[in-house]
Image: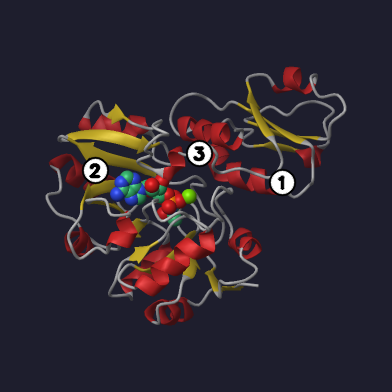
Amino acid sequence: MARISQSIEEAKALLESEEIVAIPTETVYGLAGNIFSEKAIKRIFELKGRPLINPLIVHINDLNMLEQIAQDIPEDALILAEHFWPGPLTLVLPKKDTVPDIITANKPTVAVRMPEHPVTRALLSQLDFPLAAPSANPFKRISPTKAQHVANYFPEGLELVLEGGTCEKGIESTILGFENGKAILYRHGALAKEEIVALIGEIGEHTNNEEAPEAPGMLLQHYSPRTPLILVDDVSEAMKDYPEMEIGLIVFSTPVAHHPEKQQMVLSEQRSLKEAASKLYTAMHDLDQLDLDLIIAEIMPLHGIGVGMNDRLRRASK
Ligand code: TXA
Ligand code: MG
């Protein structure tokens, strides 16, 4: 069983000897390795069971590190970085040759973000290399938002999970690239599209190309619990179709009367999208532990980070 530890020193020592370590970020936990260690990076793909065609996000701590890995950075990218970093925004930028091809799946671009979590910032500040880190879940499973989720996922093959508490944002970063000088949204996530548009104006969207996914978040089946999940407008109405089943519920703010409390996750009684996003994956993990027949999730509000939440729920329902 992977050990959960608060020791940044220990994490640093393992990473410096080309091992991999699970790290906390404000979005979800990541499986991290030195971007320049082929051994560590191969191990990440192997442990996750992730195909090599899916590139990894590089995590940096300051803009000096950005200059080491990216070039010809568009003006809008610099504006966004300045405004939203550290934070849940990943920028896909033209890469420098120094970035190994295995990180970027042979693409000419590299995905970069500066995470905000204090533990991982402290760790990165003590390393002289950036960390590649996909979400710390086996391929196609729900991303982990607690150290224990990671430890449960990898009973073997992972030595250390660096403890960072519950991830504050709770869903993955928003991914933005640039095509012919125009900003394109590749993945909805913890930074609302509206906030990006407010800063740089209208942007394009490429979030549904399943033939040649720019981001595997776009592969059809992803983020799934083992229990079948359906996504509906009206939970009470949908429940009537499954009278014989043990059902788990995920609702935004209003509980369904007479349904067992343990089997229903109310994401935010206050109707706060922020609170709801932070609880979404934990709700999915917890319901998945109960061996139910079906999870019925309510469609979240259609704005702000609700868009990213609905995207994850829709994929979990496929
Ligand atoms: O919040 C997050 O972004 C978390 C934490 C750990 O930072 N990481 C994460 O990584 O979600 P992962 O590997 O699960 O998702 C990364 C996404 C993938 O969909 C990948 O295809 C996309 O980033 N990506 C990476 N490099 C890319 C590139 N050069 N061009 C387009 N998409 C890229
Ligand atoms: Mg992932």
Work out whether residue 277 or residue 101 is closer to the camera in this orientation and state it: 101
Closer to the eye: label 1 or 2: 1
Crowding near pointer 1: few (<14 within 10 Å), some, many (20+)?
A: many
Q: Write the residue at 44% across / 56% down.
A: 134
The residue at which mark 3 appears reads as 274
What's the residue type where badge 1 is placed? Asp
Which numbered marker is on residue 255?
none
N-terminal label among 1 and 3:
3
Mark 1 in CB contact with mark 2 (< 8 angstroms): no
Q: Are marks 2 and 3 in contact (CB under 8 Å)?
A: no
- Tell me where residue 283 appears, x and y as whole percent: 66, 43
Residue 4 visible somewhere in the drawing: yes
Q: Image quadrant for the C terminus?
A: top right
State the residue lying farthest toward the right.
Answer: 244
Q: Amino acid at mark 3?
A: Lys
Q: Secondary structure at mark 3?
A: helix
Q: Is residue 188 left or right of residue 148?
A: left
Left or right of 168 in this view: 4: right
Counting labels gives 3
Q: State which mark lies toward you, 1 or 3.
A: 1
The amino acid at mark 2 is: Leu
Residue at image mark 2:
80
* Residue depicted at 52% across the width and 53% down the height: 167
Which is more foreground, mark 2 or mark 3?
2
Label 1 sits on residue: 288
Q: Secondary structure at mark 2?
A: helix
